[in-house]
Image: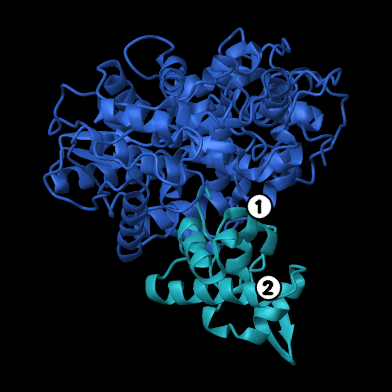
Chain colours: A cyan, B blue
């Protein structure tokens, strides 16, 4: 099984890069995953990642994209509260790529 | 990846024919294969965890069982005369040039094995009839190429024998599952529905929170308290919709559209958290057992909630599965009100209301959109809507014309029964098949580029969760924006005028006056 390497420890992930053990997540690991995804983490990226993690803790699933957008609108302002801005942050898609960096399971289904 | 961005007609720019036959590139897609299902995903839905030692014997045994139980499958495997009518009808062939993606060639991967073990000539003179042994190479080719068929059946429309090629792909996948070589995307998802009630893994608490959030949004936007009820016993209508409608864009805007329609006519309806999925991936893998299990959830929800009707939301293959098999696999539904079709499609419901004049629209609210419509393969070629032949083509278009001033169809040989698949259907809507998805979308995208050029079309409407997600993903490769795909009921939602709805207002700067006037007459 493939794994992320970080300060001498390894964290296993699936074929697509989602970590297998959700408890193994840390901010350090998020940076490693982000680097793998060719994303440089800014405050805005962290805002999204942290919101996803909070939401997941409460609901055991990632939020609907619309819910995420609403949150971003609230915290970063109206001009950033849209899908395009989220895709600018996470080019592969906010749901999947941001979940991967946040250490959450991949959203499955017709999404 | 693809040439140009066509938002406005470019004079003199010639868009290639969507159905143009490509140069052959043997083996072009031989590398394409989805991730294997893990033992855990396999076993959860009744298949061996990994490739079994005696896979060959078991695969041949399974094939024998399938043709013994399905006269249709046997006929499909027996009757092909290699006339070639289907060769250039597959979007994956047109987009990849790989000759094994000619439907006849892809099916032959299974057919040659069938011949070898189940026909007289193939048993004794295999070299005369193109019969071949089942080997590991053959099995690998099955895995690769039967995951390059979206079971859209466009080729079947042109087959003079009416061979249902989708059935052949389903059979091949079922055989592979039975020997432990299943596909991760489909099998993980089926397991999730069994466990959580939907493809997403959305649990009741999150489901409720999402719906409440949408109620808030609608009220903020319109001033009207539109409800999205969950698990309400005694409701008349159970809405079963793809769980993508609770999660993704533009799907969720379609869900808002259904809710507004129900609200406007005072319908009593509910969503179920137990059966919160219309999609039925059991069909994609040819597994009747799994398909039935998923349908029984819908039946149980309908019984537990005491509803009178079941309405399906915008989901292509769900409608195919429900329209064809719900009653036979999970019926009889004698506890429902039989004055209504079982099941009914949300488009049929909305269309009926439009016919009765029960809905009020301001079409100009969609004037920023110049629209075309994508006939989803499973709705077009495997089901129907309404009580007239071709209703599945006419009803969605009639809805769109009722809510939108600027509607233009794509070229005739790319729509209705000749529609091209979005490129992501049949259990292929997964990131590990993205190259195939982008290439397979080419015919549909060229047809859209054509209407963009000819009529300034900006958006494409779909009635399938897979089509919507696929378009949002691949359209940027073809010069469109990811949000140029809309739900049919999103268009309804944009234009509908609810009783008591806010109109005008500061955001409605251009035609606020007009809108307000119409709202009064509508209210």
* Chain bearing mark 1: B
* Chain bearing mark 2: A
Residue carrying label 1:
B431
Tell me whether circle 2 and circle 1 mark residues in contact (CB < 8 Å): no
Q: Nearer the viewer, residue A67 or B85?
A: A67
Q: Quadrant of the N terminus of chain B?
A: top right
Expressed as whole percent of the image width and height from the top left, the position of residue B101 reads 74, 29
Apparent side of residue A23 relative to residue B423 in the rendered image (left or right):
left
Expressed as whole percent of the image width and height from the top left, the position of residue B238 reads 24, 41
Write the residue at 72% across / 21% down: B450
The mark closer to the camera, 2 or 1, is 1
Q: Share a chain, discs 2 and 1?
A: no
Above or below: residue B184 compared with residue B310: below
Crowding near the residue tagged with mark 1, few <14, some 14–19, many ≥20 C-alpha atoms within 10 Å: some
Apparent side of residue A98 relative to residue B385 in the rendered image (left or right):
right
Q: Nearer the viewer, residue B281 or A54?
A: A54
**SS category of the residue bearing label 2:** loop
Write the residue at 61% across / 56% down: B53
Above or below: residue B391 compared with residue A43: above
Apparent side of residue B174 relative to residue B260 in the rendered image (left or right):
right
Residue carrying label 2:
A1
The alpha-carbon separation of the residues under discs 2 and 1 comes to 19 Å
Expressed as whole percent of the image width and height from the top left, the position of residue B463 reads 47, 32
Write the residue at 74% across / 92% down: A7
Expressed as whole percent of the image width and height from the top left, the position of residue B179 reads 56, 49
**SS category of the residue bearing label 1:** helix
């Amino acid at each position: 099984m493939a794994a992320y390497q970080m300060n001498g420890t390894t964290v296993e992930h699936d074929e697509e890069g989602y970590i297998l053990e959700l408890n193994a997540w840390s901010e350090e690991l998020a940076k490693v995953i982000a680097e793998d995804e060719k994303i440089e983490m800014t405050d805005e990226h962290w805002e999204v990642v942290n919101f996803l993690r909070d939401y997941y803790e409460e609901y055991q699933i990632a939020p609907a994209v619309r819910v995420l957008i609403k949150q971003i609108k609230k915290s970063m302002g109206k001009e950033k509260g849209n899908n395009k801005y989220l895709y600018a942050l996470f080019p592969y898609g906010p749901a999947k790529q941001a979940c991967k960096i946040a250490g959450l399971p991949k959203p499955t289904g017709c999404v | 990846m693809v040439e140009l961005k066509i938002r406005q007609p470019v004079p003199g720019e010639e868009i290639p024919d969507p159905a143009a036959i490509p140069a052959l590139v043997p083996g072009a897609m031989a590398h394409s294969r989805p991730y294997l299902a893990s033992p855990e995903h396999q076993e959860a839905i009744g298949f061996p965890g990994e490739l079994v030692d005696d896979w060959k014997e078991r695969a041949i045994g399974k094939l024998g069982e399938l043709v013994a139980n399905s006269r249709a499958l046997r006929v499909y495997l027996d009757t092909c005369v290699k006339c070639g009518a289907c060769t250039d009808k597959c979007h994956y062939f047109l987009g990849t040039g790989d000759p094994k993606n000619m439907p006849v060639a892809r099916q032959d991967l299974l057919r040659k094995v069938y011949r070898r073990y189940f026909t007289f000539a193939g048993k004794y003179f295999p070299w005369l009839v193109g019969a071949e042994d089942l080997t590991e190479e053959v099995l690998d080719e099955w895995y690769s190429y039967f995951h390059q068929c979206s079971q859209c059946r466009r080729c079947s429309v042109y087959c003079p024998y009416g061979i249902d090629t989708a059935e052949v792909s389903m059979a091949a996948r079922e055989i592979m599952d039975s020997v432990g070589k299943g596909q991760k995307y489909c099998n993980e998802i089926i397991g999730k529905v069994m466990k959580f009630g939907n493809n997403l893994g959305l649990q009741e608490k999150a489901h409720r929170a999402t719906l409440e959030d949408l109620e808030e949004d609608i009220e903020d936007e319109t001033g009207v308290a539109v409800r999205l009820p969950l698990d309400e016993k005694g409701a008349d209508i159970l809405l079963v919709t793809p769980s993508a409608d609770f999660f993704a864009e533009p799907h969720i805007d379609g869900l808002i559209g259904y809710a507004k329609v129900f609200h406007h006519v005072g319908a009593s309806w509910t969503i179920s958290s137990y059966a919160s999925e219309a999609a039925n991936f059991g069909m994609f893998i040819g597994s009747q057992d799994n398909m039935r299990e998923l349908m029984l959830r819908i039946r149980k929800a309908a019984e537990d909630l005491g509803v009178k009707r079941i309405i399906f939301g915008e989901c292509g293959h769900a409608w195919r599965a429900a329209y064809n098999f719900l009653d036979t696999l999970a019926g009889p539904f004698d506890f429902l009100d039989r004055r209504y079709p079982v099941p009914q499609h949300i488009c049929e419901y909305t269309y009926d209301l439009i016919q009765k004049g029960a809905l009020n629209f301001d079409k100009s609210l969609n004037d920023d959109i110049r629209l075309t419509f994508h006939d989803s393969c499973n709705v077009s070629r495997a089901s129907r809507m309404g009580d007239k032949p071709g209703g599945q083509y006419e009803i969605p278009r009639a809805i769109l014309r009722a809510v939108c001033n600027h509607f233009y169809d794509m070229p005739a040989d790319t729509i209705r029964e000749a529609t091209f698949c979005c490129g992501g259907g049949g259990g292929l809507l997964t990131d590990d098949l993205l190259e195939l998805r982008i290439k397979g979308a080419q015919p549909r995208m060229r047809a859209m580029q054509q209407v963009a050029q000819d009529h300034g079309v900006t958006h494409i409407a779909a009635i399938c969760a897979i089509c919507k997600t696929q378009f949002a993903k691949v359209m940027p490769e073809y010069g469109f924006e990811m949000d140029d795909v809309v739900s049919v009921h999103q268009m309804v939602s944009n234009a509908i005028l609810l009783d008591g709805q806010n109109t005008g207002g500061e955001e409605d700067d251009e035609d606020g006056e007009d809108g307000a006037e119409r709202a009064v007459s509508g209210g």
